[in-house]
Amino acid sequence: MTAAEKKQLAITACKVRMGVVTATHGAKAGHPGGSLSAADMFTYLYFKEMNVDPADQKGADRDRLVLSKGHTAPGLYATLALRGFFPVEDLPTLRHIDSYLQGHPNMNTVPGVDMSTGSLGQGISVAAGMAKGAKLQNKDFRVYTILGDGEIQEGQVWEALMFGAHYKLDNLCVIVDNNGLQIDGNVAEVMSPYPIVDKLEAFGYEVSAIDGHNFDEIEAALAKARATKGKPSAIVMKTTKGKGVSYMENKAGWHGKAPNDEEYKIAMDELQAQLAELEAN
């Protein structure tokens, strides 16, 4: 990756975070914390990694993303909007009664969404099924799924992981957003999922552990996943919940709460400053 490419990714990720703040403020509800922590991965997937085309949204050979932690829809929506799937100007309509941008992804109303998700644990099962379907049809598209670290407390997740390994789904890439916090607090205290990497390896996955805010590490992990044959891949990315907004960072309270007008201004001022610095350097 060139320095220019990395700079553009950082700029785009900052704009994704601005979209998250704008959408949740407009909704007066939503889930900013986990959307912000996954913003860099969303950005890399849609702007560099995945074979997707806003002009051919249902192309049979496109790569798929299943957002298993569906409550972080604001992050996915902001990314899709910036990628050209629908107008950025629609983001503030999030969760409004007459809006197509509801609180969890809806594949029937939101352009670019590959699966309706929200009930935690189910998305990865769908992703595994998509990957198996690709194998049965001799298609070479890839399927990515993003899970929360609190979400992997769900038993269904591990059934799906077992399925992926059993059928040697090397077209499946499971990404765990390990920001360490869920709605009830620290994941290690609520119901510890650790050691995540060891468990995924024991289930038969090729695992990379990375800094989820480092584009070089994201690139290397996804390249390793593409190169892995005969088994599925997993990426455990260490992230900061609420990344980019000082008062949200590492605060479980921002899992599912929207910024008020004053908080919105503070957040946008911070992100605008980060954007200006990125564009200047």
Image (cartoon, rainbow, N blue to C red):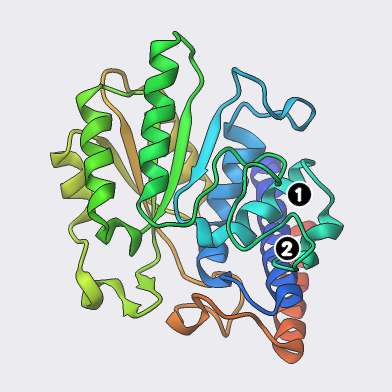
- Cα distance, mark 2 to mark 1? 9 Å
For the point 23% across and 29% down, the residue is 165
Q: Is residue 142 left or right of residue 92?
A: left
For the point 43% across and 62% down, the residue is 239
Tell me, for residue 81, which label it has, or none. 1
Q: Position of residue 138 (x, y in %)?
A: 44, 8
For the point 76% across and 49% down, the residue is 81
Q: Position of residue 96 (x, y in %)?
A: 75, 68
Which is more toward the observer, 222 or 281?
222
Element marked by disc 1: helix
Q: Position of residue 143 (x, y in %)?
A: 47, 31
Disc 1 crowd rating (10 Å Cα; few below 14, some 14-19, many 20+) is: many
Outermost residue toward the top? 138
Element marked by disc 2: helix
Q: Position of residue 139 (x, y in %)?
A: 49, 12
Marks 1 and 2: in contact by CB < 8 Å? yes
Q: Is residue 93 left or right of residue 242?
A: right
Quadrant assignment, res 137: top left
Which callout, 2 or 1, points at the residue further toward the start of the chain? 2
Q: Amino acid at mark 2?
A: Gly
Q: Quadrant of the N terminus?
A: top right
Q: Amino acid at mark 1?
A: Ala
Q: Is residue 150 above or below residue 173?
A: below
Q: Is residue 213 left or right of residue 25?
A: left
Q: Is residue 169 above or below residue 21?
A: above
Tag 2 residue: 19
For the point 42% across and 20% down, the residue is 133
Tell me, for residue 153, which label it has, or none. none
Look at the image and tell me whether residue 2 can be seen. no
Quadrant assignment, res 248: bottom right
